[in-house]
Image (cartoon, coloured by chain):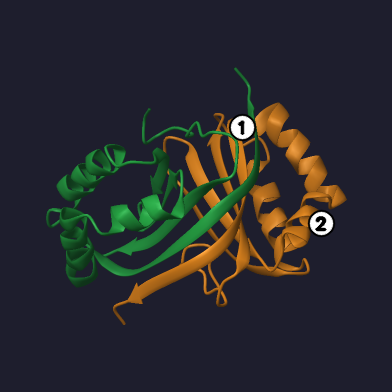
Chain colours: A green, B orange
Amino acid sequence: MSLHDLASTPKPPYYAAIFTSQRSEGDGGYGATAERMLELARAQPGFLGVESVREAAGLGITVSYWSSREDIRAWKDVLEHRAAQARGRAQWYTGYQLRICKVEAEHGFRSH
Amino acid sequence: MSLHDLASTPKPPYYAAIFTSQRSEGDGGYGATAERMLELARAQPGFLGVESVREAAGLGITVSYWSSREDIRAWKDVLEHRAAQARGRAQWYTGYQLRICKVEAEHGFRSH
């Protein structure tokens, strides 16, 4: 599973956390922490997959998929993740929005 | 409202259509059609906002927000949109996934 690919998810219903963010300038430890958070998220109960894209101008969308809303809440409360969230507000982001969603239906297409 | 910004959405519940896609190489009319689809979507009943990011390697995530699931279904069935969807499968995308979600909760942060 790559960050640079479409996620394979089970039949709905399941949950999605849509995290849209605008990065401030410079790295300031962001890249290393982002990688670490991904590693931690993948080890969390209920983690199903993730898709993440950021454009050069700084706008990014990361969607993580989870078995239940409780799994998302538990991930939010992981201590190391909470520390990263605080640093995100203080340093890495000029703004973000997190939306918690129930995936009700999906369909897709692959040419190969 | 810019595509290159965070969307302002009302208090949940509302709906999100998460469209994750992998572009094939070359433009082939894609850019013009994508702009036209955005213009059409904005004029549809129930349209609330959109966030869209594509990275150089071709992976993109576009999340559009809607008042109801019926509004998303109506947008899917717009004739010009259906034609674009068919061309997307034939030409513009090597793969995509569309997930229809109910946004149950959200929170955000703005530094300015």
Q: Residue at x 54, y 65 (%)?
A: B104
Tell me where residue A47 appears, x and y as whole percent.
38, 40
**Circle nearer the viewer, 2 or 1:** 2
At label 2, the amino acid type is: Ala
> Which residue extends farthest top?
A112
Sequence-wise first label, 2 or 1: 2
Q: Are marks 2 and 1 in contact (CB under 8 Å)?
A: no
Q: Is residue A67 above or below residue A112?
A: below
At label 1, the amino acid type is: Tyr
> Which residue extends farthest right?
B79
Tell me where residue A31 appears, x and y as whole percent.
19, 48
Q: Is residue B68 above or below residue B20?
A: below
Report if residue A55 is visible in the image. no
Say which element carries label 1. strand
Q: Chain of mark 2?
A: B
Asked whether the residues under marks 2 and 1 belong to the same chain, the reply is yes
Which residue bears the numbered disc 1? Answer: B93
> Which residue extends farthest front?
A70
Along the horizontal axis of the image, is B11 left or right of A93?
right
Q: Residue at x 76, y 62 (%)?
A: B71
Q: Is residue B84 above or below residue B66?
A: above
**Quarter holding the C terminus of chain A?**
top right
Tell me where residue A21 appears, x and y as whole percent.
37, 62
Q: How many marks?
A: 2
> Which residue extends farthest bottom?
B112
Residue B74 is tagged as: 2
Tell me where residue A55 appears, x and y as whole percent.
39, 51
> Observer-nearest residue: B6 or A36?
A36
Q: Chain of mark 1?
A: B
Report if residue A84 is visible in the image. yes
Say which element carries label 2. helix
Disc 2 crowd rating (10 Å Cα; few below 14, some 14-19, many 20+) is few
